[in-house]
Image: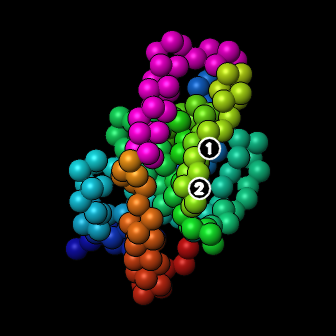
Amino acid sequence: MAMERDGLTDSAYSRCIIKSFKHDGSLHRVWMKNWEIPPGKLYPSVETEAAAVFLNDHTPIRESDGKEWTSRVPAVSFFIPGEWFNIVALLEEKGVRYYCNLASPYYRYGDVLTYIDYDLDVVLLPDGTVQELDRDEFAKHKLEYRYGDNVQAQVEEGLARLRSRIAARAFPFDDGMVKSYYEEWKRETTRKGVVE
């Protein structure tokens, strides 16, 4: 018999907290309510990558200074083992916007997932435009937090691999998959009467 957790069984979606830190170990941001997609509901491309995939909708977010706010749009987040980036697909009115964080490979313990945020971000807009953000912040924190040569190299290599995936529209840059994950999750949580 499966154990109940927050109204869902362990064979279904399980709840997880996502925490990002800075290089010096200080807390950056916490996404309080996320739901992991169980292996049986993952697309084959996701299973091949061994990715962890999470959904949230209007989740409470806590900043490092303790201030809290609520996300405005649904999101599907992808964490690929060993990669120096993670990808958040934001389901907005104009389409799916992919916000990609250059970050350390994730670490998971129990119902908490963590990673170190390395400032640089890449955004893929619904119209196909790609933007790199916060290069200046990366340069500043590289000195302030004393990023070593290895970390800097890993971030730049991660950026190159991320850009290759975007250019090829390789996993997980698939609007249909993202929408399908979200819609199935909403159907199941609505059916089971789970309140987010």
On screen, residue 71 versus residue 79, left or right, reads right
Residue 150 magenta-drawn?
yes
Q: Secondary structure at mark 1?
A: strand
Numbered badge on residue 89: none
On screen, residue 76 versus residue 141, left or right, reads left
Q: Residue at x 57, y 42 (%)?
A: 122
Q: CA distance from mark 1 to mark 2?
A: 8 Å
Q: Which image quarter is the C terminus in?
A: bottom right
Give how far across and how far down residue 154 sits, in percent: 45, 24
Magenta range: 142-167
Q: Residue at x 29, y 68 (%)?
A: 41
The answer to which of 31 and 121 lies nearer the viewer is 121
Give how far across and how far down residue 175 sits, in percent: 45, 65
10 Å crowding of disc 2: few (<14), some (14-19), many (20+): some
Residue identifier under label 1 = 131
User: In the figure, 85 relative to 78: above or below?
Assistant: above
Residue 110 makes an appearance in the image: no
Asked whether the beta carbons under mark 1 and mark 2 sit within 8 Å of each other, the answer is yes
| Displayed quadrant of residue 73 | bottom right
